[in-house]
Image: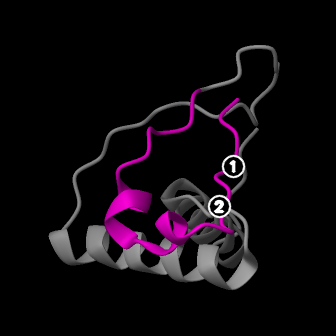
């Protein structure tokens, strides 16, 4: 699994450096429906920019890497609860 970047150095505060990191690799040792897969979707440019900026803001706030995928998962989980969608 990808290690989290060290945020104590000045490069960690550079948005372009942060955006250039490799995406997280899938851990194939986990069974079940909660494994993470790579899914490519099309979205509006403004949503993509919003995700990047929000992930960067939360990373700086928390001191640990927050991925765009984490934000999407959070939003979909909230949507699933709101709409009472079951995933059996």
Q: Residue furthest left?
A: 45
Question: Residue 51, image x and y in percent?
Answer: 41, 71
Quarter holding residue 15: bottom left
Give yes or no for contact between labels 1 and 2 (Cβ–Cβ under 8 Å). yes
The N terminus, quarter of image: top right
Residue 40 falls left or right of residue 70? left
Q: Nearer the viewer, residue 85 or 12?
A: 12
Question: Which residue shows up at 72% across the image and 52% down it?
Answer: 86
Please state the extent of the stretch shown in magenta in the rendering: 1-25
Residue 50: within the magenta? no
Residue 15: within the magenta? yes
Which residue lies under the disc numbered 2?
Answer: 65
Question: Which residue shows up at 57% across the image and 67% down it?
Answer: 71
Which residue lies under the disc numbered 1?
Answer: 4
- Figure check: 50 above or below 45: below
Alpha carbon of mark 1 to alpha carbon of mark 2: how far? Answer: 6 Å
Residue 46 falls left or right of residue 8? left
């Amino acid at each position: 699994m990808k290690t989290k970047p060290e945020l104590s150095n000045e490069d960690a505060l550079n948005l372009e450096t942060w955006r250039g990191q490799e995406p997280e690799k899938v851990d194939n040792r986990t069974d079940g429906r909660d494994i993470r897969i790579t899914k490519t979707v099309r979205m509006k440019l403004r949503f993509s920019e919003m995700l990047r900026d929000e992930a960067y803001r939360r990373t700086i706030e928390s001191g640990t890497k927050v991925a765009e995928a984490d934000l999407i998962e959070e939003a979909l989980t909230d949507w699933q609860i709101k709409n009472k969608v079951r995933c059996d």
